[in-house]
Image (cartoon, rainbow, N blue to C red):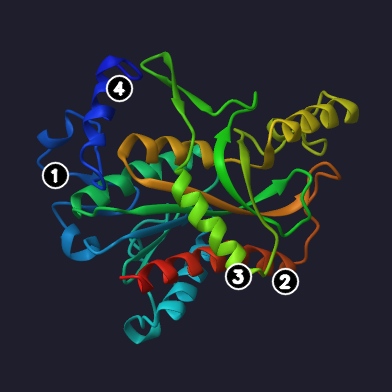
Amino acid sequence: MVPGGPAEKKAEEKHASNEGSINIKNPHFDKMKEDVLYHFGLGTGTHNFPTMFGDVKFVCIGGDTSRMKTFISYIAGQLGIAGPGNEFPNICASTDRYVMYKAGPVLSVSHGIGMPSASIMLHELIKLLHHARCSNVSLIRLGTSGGLGLEPGSVVITKQAVDATFKPQLQQMILGKPVIRSTVLDKELAEQLMECGKELNQFNTVTGNTMCTLDFYEGQARLDGAICLFTQEEKLKYLTAAHEAGVKNIEMESSIVAVMCNQTGIRGAVVCVTLLNRLQGDQINLSREALAELELRPQILVGHFIKKHLSKK
């Protein structure tokens, strides 16, 4: 199958009639006798995926390992789920790449920093969900970001991830050729999350575009990196143009989340708290306590969404 070609588009149309399933777009996949998820320390030959993960309906991912451990304890408390010995063991304890925790229908997984790390995790996570025969899964990234024109502590629900030219697309090099894929996220899921923000009314919650970059410093127009060959005026001109194009925040993973979810039929969302207004500065000067409080905001919003959704069952 040529990436981005007619065969790939035909596969997308075929999947549209199989709503809710995990669509693995790989003709070689079913030929494997065993699938080793190396970076998770799991495999189909050593673990019973349907038994371990078959009831998963919500997958929440985030960069930091400790944040995802905090989240699983938080959501377990919200849902009244007790872990063995009041603890939730790290399912990926045999490797130091990522962490994974489970509480009932909720899976909490770290993805590291940036799209390359997140991409590796998402490939193996989506295969895991497929092997477990999961369906109707919602995947939500809980993150931090730099805001544009927003007060610090605002929570942004991404409509679409955009690249550095403000286009809703991600260009990937596959077999030495550029492949462009859409980075528009699930509209209905974004609207449901926004409604939860209004119901909570605890902090400023908005929807908008999220700019996804390959770098924290030059790629995000920061003046405080080891290398910077542009002026303050050029920086502000660029960030102002991004803001005028509908960009509410900047981070480093939303595009690959959108692409992977779109390609495999998973409802995807990105919910990030802003740690500063990038139109006013570059450095994050929050205390550890203040940072911890802000990082909880996406968890509170998504926890409310999950609890509300499950209460309807």
Point 35% across, 86% down: residue: 85
In this rendering, the label closer to the viewer, 3 or 2? 3
How far apart in space, not on screen, are marks 2 and 4 (Cα)?
Answer: 48 Å
Q: Residues within 10 Å of mark 3 (few under 14, many from 20)?
A: few
Q: Eyeballing the image, is 132 above or below 256?
A: below
Q: Position of residue 175 (x, y in %)?
A: 36, 16
Q: What residue type is labelled 4?
A: Lys
The residue that label 1 is drawn on is 34
In this rendering, the label closer to the viewer, 2 or 4? 4
Of pointers 2 and 1, the one earlier in the residue sequence: 1
- Residue in front for this viewpoint, 181 or 64: 181
Kindly check if marks 2 and 4 are in contact, taking CB atoms under 8 A apart as contact. no
> How many discs appear?
4
In this rendering, the label closer to the viewer, 4 or 1? 4
Kindly check if marks 4 and 1 are in contact, taking CB atoms under 8 A apart as contact. no
Q: Eyeballing the image, is 181 above or below 209?
A: above
How far apart in space, not on screen, are marks 2 and 1 (Cα)?
Answer: 45 Å
The residue that label 4 is drawn on is 9
How far apart in space, not on screen, are marks 3 and 4 (Cα)?
Answer: 40 Å
Q: What residue type is labelled 2?
A: Glu
Of pointers 2 and 4, the one earlier in the residue sequence: 4
How far apart in space, not on screen, are marks 3 and 2 (Cα)?
Answer: 22 Å
Q: Which amino acid does label 3 sit on?
A: Leu
Q: How crowded is mark 1: few (under 14 residues within 10 Å), some or many (20 or more)?
A: few
The residue that label 3 is drawn on is 200
Instruction: State the SS at label 1.
Output: loop
The residue that label 2 is drawn on is 289
